[in-house]
Image (cartoon, grey):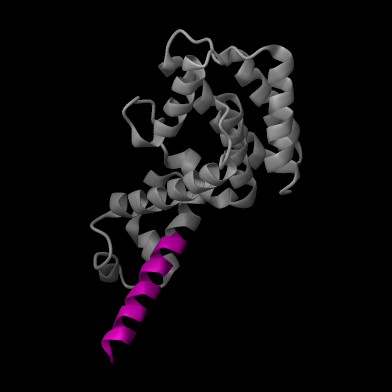
Amino acid sequence: MTAQAVEGRRSRTRQALLVAAEQLFAEQPVDAVAIDDIVRAAKVAKGTFYNHFDDRDGLVREIMVAIRLRIEALVTAANAGVEDPARRVVRGVCAYVRYALDEPRSVRILLRVQPARTALTSRLNSGVLDDLAAGLSQGRFNLATTESGMLLIMGVSQVAMARALEDAAVALPITQQLCGLLLKGLGVPADEAERTAAQAADDLIRRSA
């Protein structure tokens, strides 16, 4: 077998393990899924698993990194050319919900596995913190601390994604309402908050539905 063929086989096996694990993690808690379950679903020998991952946690980390990178790319695209921090914040939330509608299995895993990344130093929170800092410096937001704003945004994003998974039909109105409340909580005037939220939801959820 040529080196290229060996590498191709290895890549297919790794992908089979990832796909099997994603399906299992989307259906039940990670702690309830054994490596035996994963290799059985992937139709590979148990020893093969350890040729690709040190343990189950290593597999989980790889899956989570891939999911987060896809979401980050979606948020970046949604906010391309958008400078207003208020618009950026709610467009980011709407991008999360759009991802939940398009990739429900991945978001089920995210909500099951992802612990709350509340540390201000977490790389995953850097974009949110930048938008909050910009909003404060421009007088767009009125917050006691950036941490409180970050936790508010994170909470709204997670709840909106979870609700979209429960019932896709209500994703648009619920996300619009939550984004309006979010902006008002950040200090944006009520009328503007409602308009900005409605536009973001229309752009990223209705248009892409």
Residue range highlighted in magenta: 1-20
Residue 36, above or below 158: below
Q: Residue furthest bottom?
A: 1
In the displayed structure, does residue 60 sit left or right of residue 79? Answer: left
Q: Residue at x 74, y 48 (%)?
A: 209
Q: Which quadrant would residue 11 be assigned to in this image?
A: bottom left
Residue 4 part of the magenta segment? yes
Image coords of residue 62 (percent x, y): 35, 53
Residue 60 x %, y %: 36, 50
Q: Is 189 on the left or on the right of 121, as rendered?
A: right
Q: Main secondary structure of the magenta part?
A: helix
Q: Residue at x 71, y 40 (%)?
A: 203
- Looking at this view, is 174 or 127 the one in front? 127
Query: Looking at the picture, does residue 125 appear above or below residue 47?
Result: above
Task: Indicate yes or no whether the magenta region holds residue 58.
Answer: no
Kindly indicate the quadrant of the structure image that contains residue 84.
Answer: top right
Q: Residue at x 74, y 29 (%)?
A: 198
Quadrant of the snapshot with the N terminus? bottom left
Q: In the picture shown, does residue 141 fall above or below 38?
A: above
Image coords of residue 111 (percent x, y): 49, 39
The answer to whether residue 51 is above or below residue 102 is below
For the question of whether residue 158 can be seen, the reply is yes
- Which residue in the rendered view is the most extreme toward the top? 144
Q: Where is residue 181 drawn, in percent x and y?
A: 65, 18
Q: Quadrant of residue 88?
A: top right
Q: Nearer the viewer, residue 7 or 126?
A: 126
